Amino acid sequence: MAILGAINPMLTVGLDGDNAWRLDDYVKRGGYSALKKIIAEKTPTDQIIKEVKKSVLRGRGGAGFPTGLKWSFMPKYFPGDKYVICNSDEGEPGTFKDRDILRYNPHSVIEGMAIAAYAIGAARGYNYIHGEIWEIYKRFEEALDEARAAGLIGKNILGSGFDFELFAHHGYGAYICGEESALLDSIEGKKGQPRFKPPFPANYGLYGKPTTVNNTETFSAVPFILNHGADAYLEAGKPNNGGTKLFSVSGHVNRPGNYEIPLGTPFATLLEMAGGVRGGRKLKACIPGGSSAPVLPAQTIMDCTMDFDSISKAGSMLGSGAVIVMDETTCMVRALERLSYFYYEESCGQCTPCREGTSWLYKVVHRIEHGQGRADDLDLLRSVTTNIMGRTICALGDAASMPVQSFVKHFQDEFAYHIEHKKCLVPPEIQRAGSGFFKATV
Amino acid sequence: MLDIEIDGRLVQVPAGSTIMDAAQLVGTYIPHFCYHKKLSIAANCRMCMVQVEKAPKPLPACSTPVTGGMKVFTHSELAVAAQKGVMEFLLINHPLDCPICDQGGECQLQDLSVGYGAGTSRYREAKRVVFQKEAGPLISMQEMSRCIHCTRCVRFGQEIAGVKELGMASRNMHSEIQTFVGRTIDSELSGNMIDLCPVGALTSKPFRYSARSWELSRRKSVSPHDSLGTNLTVQVKNNRVMRVLARENEDVNECWISDKDRFSYEALNSSERLLKPMVRVDGALREVEWNVALDYISHALKDVAKSHGAESIAALASPHSTLEELYLLQKLMREIGSGNVDFRPRRRDSSTDGKRAGTPWLGMRLSEIKDLDAVLVVGSFLRKDHPLFAQRLRQLAKKYGEVSLVSVTSDDPLIRLTEQISVPPQDLVLALAGIVKAAAELMGEAVPAGLESGDACEKSRAIAQSLLNGEKKAVFLGNVAEQIAQAGQLHALAAELCRLTGASLGFIGEAANSVGGYVAKALPTGLNAYEMFAQPRKAYVLMGLEPELDCANPQMAVAALKQASLVVLLTSFKNVAALDYADVMLPIAAFAETSGTYVNTEGRVQGVAGVCRPQGEARPAWKVLRVLGNVLGLPGFEYESSEQVRDELIPSGTEFVEGLDNGVELRIQSIGSYPSGLQRIADVPIYFADSLVRRAVSLQQTKDAAIPAARMNPQTLAELGVVVGSRVRVRQDQGEAVLTACSDSTVPAGCVRIAAAHPTTAALGEMFGPIDVERA
């Protein structure tokens, strides 16, 4: 994948393929100026947090929680260590933006984390990078070496008296470790399993100390906000949805890849940037925010603009910005079967509804897909998802339930056809003619 | 305090409480599995979901903190729907075969499924199958498909036992509770996991499929083993003890019991039980009637008294005997005219006898331990000698209490220790003297006379400092500190340390009646336990004792018994070694078969009733002694019940005995040089500590019941030129044993750790003293 297009880019501005990730290039693009300015002027931390709040930078990891607000939860006068953590454990099917940020612009993340550390009073940070992207982990380590050599991280940064040590930490590929508290456990060397909340990481985080966890893209946007001001950032998007966002477009499009567009850009524009639906076929459905976001049928998504509020109003989530496009050759039962398998496999097994429920969901959808559906299966699916949602320790239970609920809701006739006729509504030859997107069946 | 409302009832709860705490306060039951008051919160079963006003979704009661004005509905439609939903999830993969499950009838899942489960299952897929695991001789993991992943067992191991022996491996629905690959569960507290398991996944191996819970009658009892006086529920069927469970007593054992307390009941049905009195006739022990045996003893004792004087008779009792038994034994002896009576068979040094201010005890209540700031334990194999006492210290250390240990090995007590000093036994006095000196120096006081040359090393200073820092602190003397030859000096030094630091002095106590024996006045006015063998007597009366395993110097004890003309054994078991020297063996009722009283280490009086009939013709020892008194024609043996005996000592209804005082009037001796050369360190292995556990079949299969080895520091091994795993001959005086040499870096250099209380080492001498080791 690569970054294939942009409108008014902020995160990917000035990037030239794979050749501009080094410190020199980043500095040439104006990098580290925000950090240098802050530590030189000893900007009050409140002012930084205020600026970030004003920019309405919403978390880019999926939940869209306002970043400035999150930072302000950190206890100000805590005696002892505080931590800032970057969540690069990008495991959601369809999402591949953070790895491109780390590959093409790693120093923006380092600078963003250093600024965050300054703002919340942390002296130590970790970037948790998931295990399957080893070359990117190595590149980030290289970038860290560069920054360390240049005195941009480490003890007494640029003689300012501000200390910030940053380390890369790689996981082993468990999806659950992208959940922030499981991620903290994983860094601590434990089995990655979500913690119940409260207490939240801001009070009891890594090693029991106050901790802020933000997404890679979120940190990457911080230098821009401090360089150009919250207003400039906010203006790029639309109210309550500041800035630009990277969208990972995949599925039945001609040019799958990452696209940076201002929030509020119409979906149609994004689809067009991605080269439109493959083979000129008709759009059938789209998952707008990663596999856990509810699917939206073509007519709904075509009316949406790509921002948190609009997608939410349409009944889905902007999530991590992973746009999965499905054309008319897709069998929705088969698509759901694959998604359910993912959540069944990746449930950590800690709490009852998710451990038992995700496997149940998968087994039922699998049965329907394989011609053994029963008349009451759709009611059963709805009921099981209701029993999972909102009853689990972390959001994985919800993430597993929302696709099932939305697929069954929007494409009920296809499921009913499957149960009744023991075969797909979309004939297999048409599915085959489409693409190999949902090739894997289990 | 916060005002909240639960199901319409107003309650005041302390800030920081959870909804579960609050509900328990008002007596509202919220269904739960993973929650346990003594374990950390996991919130993983999700059964305790309740509705909270203004919350968009149900919240788990166990982990949701209360806030002022909160309105909680535990049985609203939303709450019950959530609870029923979770119950369905729990049951889809759980085998629904309660009639053939060992937990059936006492299963939390079964009970709650009645209220929250559906009549039929909507789940028609294949159920999960989890393979059985091998976890050792005590816990069965045969039915792991029944596990509901509440992780109580895992948290128990980590938090209470101090060692993580179980964990949850894998993820999603294939998560499995298991041991580390190829390992077993070896903790001395492991049996509690069986109680904690809310389903039939972890069950008791010895009890499994031997009875149904509703067939058992539950009777209260108290553990006869260690000095804690653990409260037990003994379950009996057809006059047979089938199982022992914990009886909750927050002040004593909380809700835990050690494996020793739990599984030792197996010994009651041992084939070694002595069922009929036996008397030596023509050189062999023959079964006889009670009256014959008692007449025999009566005549023989009178003969000995007449021809050699009453002082040639000695009596020694096990400290695991009841208060009444100890009292009657000493009364009997004193009436005969002998003051040679004792109940401390492993005690070597008696220099404090007659110089004590009162009955030695813990120095505080057990429930006060949790409030201590600093603790120093001297001379103890903490974990194995006192499993639950160690557990209390473990919790204390977790809450920032400073616990230090000065002992003869550096065994890991699984407690976060501030400092640990391990020295050869003869240097224990030096080590403690160093701490006393350090404390005096830190306080700016004169170093006590004789200790000037002591070595107040850095660790000693750190320990002294920790004792000075805290507000509430204690120094506890363990079993080793009472067993070694310098016990009196240790006592005096510890008392001085306590005077300097303001700490409280305590003895942890070796056995169930280590305090009770003093209360029962079972103390020598003539020869003490050690002297009565060092100066052989003509007649011995031994109660509940296996001298070759229970005495400070078994070699000497057995030699003395062999030369005696009369050896009377009151015992529950046919002791093979005793066949050599016993002239009379009287079968006495074992634990659970007799009524009696135990006074635990904190001075707590705990009476027990017999919960089943004694086996065979065995009789409670107090009755035997009472009748023996009658047969001997002694006055004051007209008791009708054990309570009557007790009433002579302690008024009925006494909760704690009086006269507890650890003061001692013993001068601190100047520290001199102690003998060099190879020294023996003898621990009393947990499952050889008394005659019951020695015959508990399952406990004997555990790792703690391994045959003793000669454990030495690698350095010592090298000096002796002994190869690890080779056989070595160890020799003390006339006795020797051939053992396997074993490398153990927790043993100080110049020492050999060889367990006492085991038949293979019974021929050896003193527990702590010089020993020779050579290649066999």
Image (cartoon, rainbow, N blue to C red):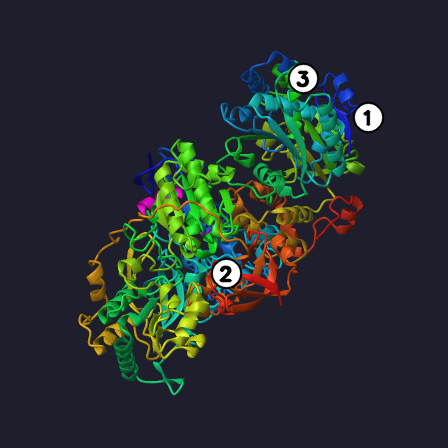
The residue range painted magenta reads B17-34
Residue beneath disc 2: B202
Task: Kindly identify which chain the residue marked by label 1 belongs to.
Answer: A
Q: Which mark is residue A19?
A: 1
Location of residue B76 in the rendering, given as x and y in whole percent from the top left corner: 38, 45
Q: Is residue A241 visible?
A: no
Locate residue A233: give its quadrant.
top right
* Residue B42 relative to residue A39: left or right: left
Q: Nearer the viewer, residue B303 or A175?
A: B303
Q: Secondary structure at mark 2?
A: loop
Task: Tell me which amino acid carries mark 1.
Answer: Asn
Mark 2 belongs to which amino acid?
Leu
Q: Dot 3 surroundings within 10 Å: few (below 14), some, or many (20 or more)?
A: some
Q: Which mark is drawn over residue B393?
A: none
Q: Which residue is painted at 62% across and 68% down in the image?
A: B776
Q: Position of residue B622 (x, y in %)?
A: 27, 70
Q: Which residue is mark 3?
A: A158
- What element does badge 3 sit on? helix
Give the label, 1 or 3, closer to the camera: 3
